Image: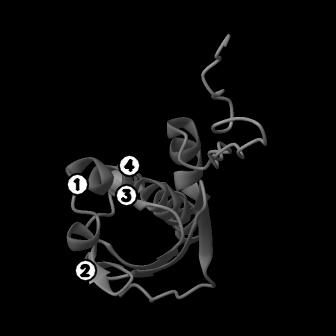
Amino acid sequence: METTKIRTLFTGRRKSSVARVRITHGKGKFLVNSVNSPDYFKRKTLQKIVEQPLELAGGLEKYDITANVDGGGLSGQAGAVRLGIARALISLNPEFRAALKKAGFLTRDPREVERKKYGLAGARKRFQFSKR
């Protein structure tokens, strides 16, 4: 019989989203903000992004996952949850590290939105030039 391990929260970040992920041995229950994952991430691409580390580790049906996500949009939240799941899987089984690292799931995507500058329409876009 496998023992259930509940560890501290594993954090994943992407853009301005922060995900706190808990993982335990279970039957494949996956909740995001107390809602089933497919109901929260309605687009198939977002569901795929979130499930990638589990598919690589072969644990779609082995682990119960609970994630709380704040900030940003759905795309950033999906990336944050993916990073949190990857970090949590390593804590359960350190042998997953090489495969997850090679797939790029342990790298935090550092891209953030550039701030708007004064005198410009956005971060880089200028107002239309008028000669007269």
Residue located beneath label 4 in the image: 56
Where 48 falls versus 128 (above or below)?
below
Q: Amino acid at mark 2?
A: Lys
CA separation in Å, label 2 and label 1: 23 Å
**Mark linked to residue 50:** 3
Which element type, helix, strand or loop, lies under badge 1? Answer: loop
Residues at discs 3 and 2 in contact (Cβ within 8 Å) = no
Q: Amino acid at mark 3?
A: Val
Residue located beneath label 1 in the image: 43
Disc number lying in front (3 or 4): 3
Residue drawn 68% across the image and 30% down it: 124
Neighbor class of circle 1 (other Cα within 10 Å; few <14, some 14-19, many 20+) is: few
Residue located beneath label 2 in the image: 27
Which element type, helix, strand or loop, lies under badge 4? Answer: helix
The mark that comes first in sequence, 3 or 2, is 2
Say which quadrant the N terminus sits in: bottom left
| Percent of width and height locating residue 52 | 37, 50
The mark that comes first in sequence, 1 or 4, is 1
Residues at discs 1 and 4 in contact (Cβ within 8 Å) = no
CA separation in Å, label 3 and label 2: 17 Å
**Mark linked to residue 13:** none
Q: Is residue 45 left or right of residue 25?
A: left
Which element type, helix, strand or loop, lies under badge 3? Answer: helix
